[in-house]
Amino acid sequence: MIFKSGTSANEDGSRDLRPLDDRGPLNVMFMLTSMPVGGAETLLENLVRRMSDQFRPHICCLKEAGELGEQISAEFPFESELIHHKYDLRVLGRLKRLFRKNKIDAVVTVGAGDKMFWGRLAAKRAGIPVILSALHSTGWPDGVGKLNRLLTKITDSFIAVANSHGEFLVDFENFPKAKVRVIPNGIDVERFRSHRYDRAKTRKELGIGESDLVCGIIAALRPEKNHLLFLRSAATTLTEFPNAKFVIVGDGQERPMLETAVNDLAIKQNVIFTGSRSDVPELLSAFDVFSLTSRNEASPVSIMEAMAMELPVVAPNVGSISDTVVHGETGMIYNTGNAEKISECWTMLFEDAALRQRFGQAGRDVITTQSSLDVMVSGYESLIKEIYSRKAGLAKSDTSLDSNNEFNSSCNSTDKVASSTAI
């Protein structure tokens, strides 16, 4: 298929923009470090698969492709290994050439760090009309450093995943309120339906008995996910439910330490490490309770997936989790770092099947109405078109970018200016 480009680069890097109705699809480049199996990466996979024919998604991983990247590279224009080491300044030229070769109209960096800096800088140098940064957390790995704040002026919009996350980007990261857009994370609610999967078969494959009570966590094995707290809570819970099973889905640098902790806590027979898996709905069908123990989050995809599968959720009161997990209605919220409180929540749910069912049904209702994939895709498409149209001279005024009234009304009326000296 031949795509008609709507832009062409002049010698100075500027672009001649055609109106949206007088051109082919908008070429959108999404930039990441890599694409392993993870929350933000899965969101991106779902997003690019669902975008309308008004857009042609491209994906660029600065480093290795990763498992999801390898899968998706057969379906979309894909580049990887653009940066060779931490101080590889030549990445700027490589990215500029890549953007111009593919006639990119919009660059969306996903997460903080190198891709956020080099992606936006190269986009500006290449004359890309739309420059966006999507952030998915309120701390590492999405902490925005000094160098990335220097590029605030050339960034058209910063994408937050929930209202409270948007407030964080304004109040803590010092991004101008007018440049912050909230686009809620979304999942495929039809894929995550409990009745579609064989619970007994999945449990058998995992070595779990039909009557065993199961609590599971899905998160990369990284320090901020605090799996050690999950294991300590499991050890406490096993005093009441000695046959309970605790499933850890994900992989990462913390695995050797966590496997050692399992032995030290003498709970090896009750803990299952599945490693990184792509069959998340099947695994969730085997759980009775879903839990996270993270130190920081924004709007975790794993929680939305669990709720869509009608699982009660026990999670920390960090980020915007409490916007989705309503204590006493769709699950239970606890203060971070409290293993005894987590164990109390798990025990209460293990003891009461009717409570698990009530929380699970209420949770699915919340997700189907607030966090569908279509809502997320529409948010990205609308934002890109708004900015492109404004720069093409079609928008009547610049106020179109300030349409997120729910978020803006919750922020202070005074914009904060990003500072290169902010930490």
Image (cartoon, rainbow, N blue to C red):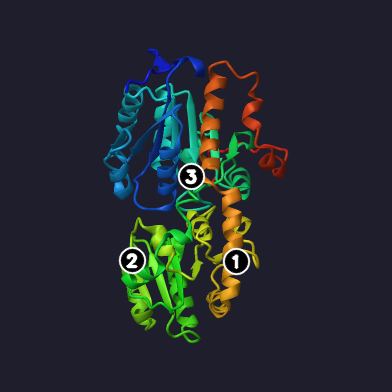
Point 64% across, 23% down: residue: 398
Q: CA distance from mark 3 to mark 2?
A: 34 Å
The answer to whether 390 appears left or right of 190 in the picture is right
- At label 3, counting other C-alpha atoms closer than 10 Å, the crowd grade (few under 14, some 14-19, many 20 or more) is some
For residue 274, above or below residue 30: below
Badge nearest the viewer, 2 or 1? 1
Question: Could you tell me residue 259's position as x and y percent?
Answer: 33, 73
Q: Is residue 156 visible?
A: no
Question: Could you tell me residue 313's position as x and y percent?
Answer: 55, 65
Q: Quadrant of residue 218?
A: bottom left
Q: CA distance from mark 2 to mark 1?
A: 26 Å
Secondary structure of residue under mark 1: helix
Badge nearest the viewer, 3 or 2? 2
Q: Quadrant of residue 73?
A: top left
Point 49% across, 34% down: residue: 132
- At label 1, counting other C-alpha atoms closer than 10 Å, the crowd grade (few under 14, some 14-19, many 20 or more) is many
| Amino acid on which disc 1 is placed | Phe
Label whose residue precedes the other's in the sequence (2 or 1): 2
Question: Could you tell me residue 365's position as x and y percent?
Answer: 60, 56
Point 39% across, 25% down: residue: 104
Which quadrant: the N terminus? top left
Pick whichever, 174 or 222, lies toward us. 222
Secondary structure of residue under mark 3: loop
| Amino acid on which disc 2 is placed | Thr
* Residue annotated with mark 1: 359
Label whose residue precedes the other's in the sequence (3 or 2): 3
Instruction: Name the mark on residue 318.
Output: none
* Residue annotated with mark 3: 145
The answer to whether 367 appears left or right of 98 in the picture is right
* Residue annotated with mark 2: 274
Label whose residue precedes the other's in the sequence (1 or 3): 3
Q: Is residue 371 visible?
A: yes
